[in-house]
Amino acid sequence: MPKSQFSSQAAASEAAKNYSPRLCNEDLAPVSKQGWSWYNIFSFWMSDVHSMGGYVVAASFFTLGLASWQVLICLLVGICIVQLCANLVAKPSQMTGVPYAVVCRQAFGVFGANIPAVIRGLIAFAWYGIQTYLAANALMLVSLKFWPALTPMTQVSWLGLSQLGWICFGIMWLLQAMVFWHGMNAIKRFIDIAGPAVYVVMGALAGWIVYKTGFDGISFTLASKSLSGGEQAWQMITATALVVSYFSGPLLNFGDFARYGKSMGEIRRGNRWGLPFNFLLFSIVTVVIVSGTQSLFGRMIIDPIETVSMVGNDLAVAIGLLTMITATIGINIVANFVSPAFDFSNCSPQKISFRTGGMIAAVGSVLLTPWNLFQSPELIHYTLDVLGAFIGPLFGILLADFYLLKRSKISVDDLFDDTPKGKYWYKGGFNPKAIAALLPSVGIGLAISFIPSLHAVANFSWFIGVALGAGAYRWIARDEMAARAGGDYRADVVMQKEQ
């Protein structure tokens, strides 16, 4: 690392003492030490990939009528797109050592950044509760497996959840809160363990499937229905888009973790091992298990909990389910706890700390009664589409501003300057151009989601949102781009690390 990087970090740390209290606290200020290696980034993605949700998404592609080898191609192409986008969104946060919400100040203004921050925080709000419910449901299965006498506690419900369900949900809620409460170092240690643990269980489950069916029972040409060549191509494109959409949430706020990376080289290496290589191996194991359930049970089972519960050995079932619970806790903290913690803290730095922001999301997730949300497939479908409709434009505007308008440069001090002299003050702390690009882009995405005649392209809402957001912002800010191309740029206030 060049000496200039150390001096830049030291200068940023010293300057943080003079940053506006309306924009800065200890959690939002540039980190003083960026110590995460490629393995920590690799573990981040392992926790994100190795979950019940990731397994279900991969396994569900069989219902589209695709053969096993086609599913693998879709998964690999989709994850390579995620890898490319992760490298792009990581750079501004790694350069400055600040989270996603603070980086957004460059595009939306120092106060306008609260718009994308709150949107991302509310999305995590709902999904935190859903993932907690999934983990609680697995815990309930383990409990009933070993203590059948608890069955009567599942027959009385309150607000849509049984008595045992409430107990299991409360346990999962507390476990996640305990990990989160100990800060980012504890989260880093947890995800370093959670991801690899699932490989052990998934590998053992795949081995058990092969042992029961033999290699002849594993078909890589398995498909649930017959499709023409054109239909197969369309379904493969759709499946690829769904892979990217599934990761769109953690992808948007990847800067919350990239800010701790030692260098962009380490982050790119972690993304390379954590996404294409790791996801391909996970996908092969998933395909083997799903394909094997067709031979073993006469039907394809896409729910990993159901598959594990059929193993027969109580101890094996308990270990398998508990490991999947651990993995779900990992992805929930990574994708749905850290993000709102920074996002809500960004709204009022002096009143809302990182811990407080996370606990707001945790408490709010209970008030949403996520089990009722999860039990409505139609509502979940619309939730995914709406998520893409919001996240896509935010992602497009952020990258268009950083790479096209600002030419990969960012002023750290101005990110925390709430005076009209600040570079990102724009008009009253808001950038009208970014907001003007965001509103119609989101509006079109929502229209695609809710107008029945447009449902055929709803699965591409994230891609459409990215293109609309980036394109609209580039066009609206074309005068600014022309000025910067002519050299009207204060390079003396820019902090950019050499790579």
Image (spheres, rainbow, N blue to C red):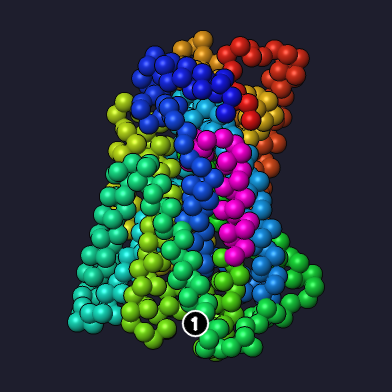
Q: Quadrant of the N terminus?
A: top right
Name the residue at 48% across, 77% down: 205
> In front: 62, or 216?
216
Residue that carries the numbered disc 1 in the rendered image: 208
Does residue 23 appear in the picture of this structure?
A: yes
Q: Position of residue 174 (x, y in %)?
A: 26, 54
Q: Position of residue 442 (x, y in %)?
A: 58, 43
Name the residue at 52% across, 58% down: 49
- The magenta-colored residue range is 257-281
How many discs appear? 1
How would you rate the neighbour count of disc 1 (Cα within 10 Å): few for under 14, some for 14-19, many for 20 or more? some
The answer to whether 250 appears left or right of 144 in the picture is right
- In this view, 320 is above or below 472: below
The question of residue 488 being in magenta is answered with no
**Callout 1, which amino acid?**
Trp
The question of residue 278 being in magenta is answered with yes
- The secondary structure type at the circle numbered 1 is helix
Q: Position of residue 100 (x, y in %)?
A: 50, 35
Does residue 412 appear in the picture of this structure?
A: no
- In this view, 365 is above or below 18: below
What is the magenta segment's predominant secondary structure? Answer: helix
- In this view, 50 is above or below 320: above
The answer to whether 329 appears left or right of 377 in the picture is left
Q: Position of residue 459 (x, y in %)?
A: 62, 58
Name the residue at 64% across, 30% down: 499
